[in-house]
Amino acid sequence: MEIKSEKNSSFENEDRYRLLFENNLAGVFRSEITGKVVEANQTMAEIFGYESPEDLKKTTAHDFYFSRKDREKYIEKLRLNGVLKNHHVKVRRKDGSEAWVIENVQIVKLGGKEYIEGTLIDFTETKNIQHVLQESEQNYKSLIEHTSAGIMIHDEKGDAIYANPAALKLIGVASLNDLADKNIFSYVLPQYHDKIRTRKDEIKKGIDATFVPMQARMPDGRVIDLETKTNHITYKGKPAIEVVIHDTAIQRQMERDKIRLQIEEETTRELKREIASHIRTRQRLNANQKYVRLLIDSSLDMIFACDQDKKITEFNTSAQHVFGYGLKEVLGKHISMLCANAAECENTFNIVLQQGTYMCETEHIKKDGSKFIALVSSSILKNERGEILGLMSISRDITRIKEAEEQLKKSVHEKEILLKEIHHRVKNNMQVISSILKLQSAYVEDKKTVELLNECRNRISSMAFIHASLYMKKDFANVHFADYVGNIATNLQQSYSSNDKKIELKLDIPDFYMHIDDAIPCGLIINELLSNSFKYAFSDKKTGTIGLSVKNRQENVILAIWDDGKGISKNIDYKNTQSLGLQLVNSLVEQLSGKMELQSKPNEGTKFVIEFNKSK
């Protein structure tokens, strides 16, 4: 019976491993050092552009690299470390395109042969996004560095942490390090300090910023007239204040000397330079706008936006393809035309306005009237002054995902019903076996044989309790241990009860669940040790106590079965005994990879303490 249980457990473990391997969202593989692919799941095949793992196995690992040297360097690094964790590598797909993957691999030896095995995760899309963001940041930095306006950034304490070339020139230093004190209050004259504090409070309240006149003392002692405008920004991930600076002294000087020809010519030249600077700035802005437009239209997700009146203002190429509308057909139309439920669309709009962002599943409707489920992420659109312009949404069709979820739920439900039926039949079969043994014992006159049959019945009952418990609930892997052990102990107490003896049973078992792989051998151990106590501990006494306690720790479990009977003789070696029951207990403890200790003295009772680690 025990051997059969172990085989069933092995088959179940193998099935679970196979399901985990085949359905893993990461690519899982094993290949020989020479490059031959031995094992691969469906995800692995899809990463490299193959239809199935069988097609992938027809190739070698050399086909996934753009050069043989790349493969050789990879093997050399893997041999040096033995394992590669979170290793980023560029690979080649079946169609020759480039992909980026994260590897977690190691070298293993099986049957005296070396293999490479591990997992791959495709992060090509993330890599592309990082590249786009880096280019956008470089464009923005170039714009700031070349603008003619002075721009300084201060932290929340008022210390300068950045200044563009125009600001440094205005201050009269080569870099911020040339300033003895970088705090804004050190170079702005004291009479303007309260104005700075007031402006900081106004920014926090969202009041629109305007240029404010003030004076500042430069490192060389000069006092210059400035116009400044401040805004709250995030710089390098931390809150900061951006200050735009204009030198008003130059402007007033030009106005005073405007009548002089030389100043007029200089002003004209300066104006030309300003115009050229503005043209360059406009060109950069136009280039950025085109780049943003390209990013939006190249997105695989549907991107659309609306103004505060819920009129559509943006509708990218992917949205046009999925919904079936042309751009001119939707611009200026109400956003509800894309929603199957107009009330739900209105509710989502209000939630986004309140919360700032919102993600939900919704039902879209196409131009032809067909509907589909989508995952939508919406957020508020604001201008540089913080004013709300409208809403932007990114939508992704998840119809296939929802269908797969429903199919999976259906499959799981069917398997639950099947497992319930299996446990029910196993329980019934064990009850039939127990009944047969009971009937057989009625025809046996030998007392020893009857006892053996009853012991077999008790062992079968302890296993039947497991399947009866699993049949009554949805969790087929864990057993409520207190109920399970309580049933075994009560059943044994009734089985060995007699009118001339009063044996008290004490149970101390916490409320927890134990994995079935641990619960079955534990139940058999408890059955054997409690049976021994009921049969032998009180052969010369009329009363006594038998106890069972369990300590459930994070990593392990400790069982203690004790009685206050006559104890076990010192001449008996419980680890090497002819007793079938104790042999079975030793075997089960070994199966649990645990350890057992006997604490017994003549006439002072017996106590077995068993400790084992929980199954993972």
Image (tube, grey):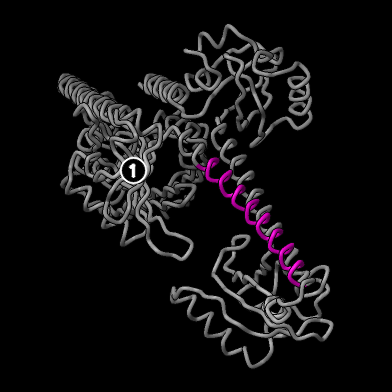
On screen, residue 200 versus residue 350, left or right, reads: right
The amino acid type found where label 1 is placed reads: Val
Residue 299 position in % (x across, y down): 46, 35
Seen as rendered, the residue at the extreme bottom is: 191
Is residue 429 a member of the stretch shown in magenta?
Answer: no
In-front residue for pair 120/31: 120
Say whether residue 539 is visible. Answer: no
Q: Which residues are magenta?
A: 263-292
Q: Which residue is mark 1?
A: 376
Residue at 57% across, 80% down = 212
- Indicate left or right for 390 with 131 as reference: left
Relative to the observer, which residue lies in front, 604 or 368? Answer: 368
The x and y percentages for residue 317 are 40, 32
Q: Residue at x 57, y 31 (%)?
A: 124
Q: What residue appears at the point 59 percent right and 45 percent down from the top-left corner?
A: 133
Query: Neighbour class for label 1 at 10 Å: few (<14), some, many (≥20)?
Result: many
- 265 drawn magenta: yes
Q: Quadrant of the N terminus?
A: top left
Up-down relation of residue 386 to residue 431 (above or below): below
Determine whether 216 is above or below 237 in the image: below
In the displayed structure, 6 sits above or below 377; it is above
Q: Main secondary structure of the magenta part?
A: helix
| Residue at the spot 74% in from the left edge and 17% down from the top edge | 67
Most foreground residue, 224 or 124: 224
Q: Quadrant of residue 65?
A: top right
Mark 1 residue element: strand
Q: Position of residue 601 (x, y in %)?
A: 47, 52
Residue 61: percent from the left, percent from the top? 65, 15
